[in-house]
Image: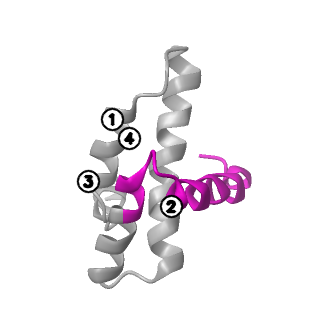
Amino acid sequence: MNDDLLPDLLAAIEQQLTSPQTPYVAKTLARLLKLGLDETEAKTQIALCLGEEMDNLLRTRKGFDEKAYRASLDALPDSGEEEEEEEE
């Protein structure tokens, strides 16, 4: 993902945190904070999930897949281990 998009994704996450339509985003943030992530890292991980779904939306030209987005959020936190394993 292009790092230039991260501020826009973080702004979208801030909106989702207060929206009655996306209570699962706030629950994910609370869960990540409880697991010990700092707020910035937790929001960044959520934003990366949103970015991935937006990328899928643009590539497939289909609607936003909320189910896949929620599944990505449920899979957090991303420890970065997969990336390390791929580099080896």
- Provide the secondary structure element on which disc 4 rests: helix
Disc on the earlier residue, 1 or 3: 1
Magenta stretch: includes residue 28: no
Q: Residues within 10 Å of mark 4 (few under 14, many from 20)?
A: some
For the residues marked 4 and 3, what is the alpha-carbon distance in whole angstroms? 9 Å
Instruction: Report the quarter where the C terminus lies.
Output: bottom left
Q: Amino acid at mark 4?
A: Tyr
88 vs 9, left or right, is left
- Provide the secondary structure element on which disc 3 rests: helix
* Chain part drawn in magenta: 1-26
For the residues marked 1 and 4, what is the alpha-carbon distance in whole angstroms? 4 Å
Tell me the chief SS of the magenta region: helix
Position above or below: 55 against 44: above
Q: Which residue is mark 2?
A: 17
Magenta stretch: includes residue 16: yes
Q: Are marks 1 and 4 in contact (CB under 8 Å)?
A: yes
